[in-house]
């Protein structure tokens, strides 16, 4: 990068030279040189133990992270188990000895938000 703050060169060279990573290393947005993507910096307010596999796991994790919840394999106060049997997915939500069986990610998010609002 030049002294005046202007970078010049092929985009690939700017990536390999870490220029884009330096420019976009912010509080809210970062550049991922491995993928060429700009990603928002995620700030998690709560954690949930998430277990399951496959596509339902991936989309559940994305939905929870979108609302500020970190998913972990470590023990957390709130637990979500994903059951995927014969194309019928269910989410088992456990908290303080209570168990709820839910039929969609939308229902799961509503219930988790209710639990978090009581904390």
Image (cartoon, rainbow, N blue to C red):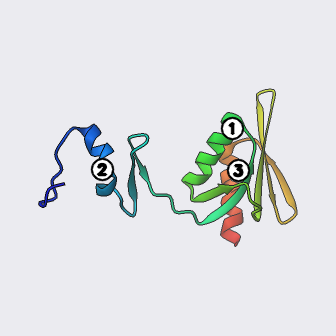
User: What secondary structure is found at the residue carrying circle 3?
Assistant: helix
Q: 10 Å neighbourhood of mark 3: few (<14), some, or many (≥20)?
A: many
Q: Which residue is mark 3?
A: 108
The mark closer to the camera, 2 or 3, is 2
* C-alpha separation, residue under disc 1 versus residue under disc 3: 12 Å
Q: Where does the image place residue 16, in percent across and percent down from the top left?
A: 32, 44
Marks 2 and 3 in Cβ contact (< 8 Å): no
> Camera-side residue: 35 or 111?
35
**Rounded to the nearest whole Å, what is the CA distance between mark 2 and mark 3?**
38 Å
For the C terminus, which image quadrant? bottom right
Q: Could you tell me if the residues under marks 2 and 1 are in contact, i.e. CB atoms within 8 Å? A: no
Vertical relation: 79 (above or below) 90: below
Residue that extends furthest to the front in the rendered view of this protein: 17
Q: Residue at x 50, y 58 (%)?
A: 42
Residue 33: x %, y % from top left: 39, 45
Q: Residue furthest bottom?
A: 119
| Secondary structure type for disc 1 | helix
Foreground tag (2 vs 1)? 2
> How much space separates mark 2 and mark 1, taking CA atoms?
34 Å
Q: Residue 48: x and y, percent?
A: 70, 58
In this rendering, position of residue 117 left or right of residue 33: right
Q: Which numbered dot is residue 20?
A: 2
Location of the N terminus by quadrant is bottom left
Tell me which numbered mark, 2 or 3, is placed earlier along the sequence.
2
Label pair 1/3, CB-CB below 8 angstroms: no
């Amino acid at each position: 990068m030049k002294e005046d703050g202007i970078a010049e060169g092929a985009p690939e060279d700017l990536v390999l030279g870490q220029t884009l990573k330096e420019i976009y290393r912010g509080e809210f947005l970062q550049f991922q040189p491995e993928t060429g993507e700009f990603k928002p910096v995620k700030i998690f307010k709560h954690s949930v133990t998430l277990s399951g596999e496959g596509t339902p796991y991936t989309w559940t994790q994305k939905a929870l992270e979108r609302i500020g919840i970190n998913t972990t394999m470590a023990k957390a106060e709130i637990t979500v188990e994903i059951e995927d049997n014969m194309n019928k997915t269910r989410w088992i939500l456990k908290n303080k000895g209570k168990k709820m069986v839910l039929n969609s990610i939308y229902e799961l998010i509503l219930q988790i938000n209710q639990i978090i609002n009581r904390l």
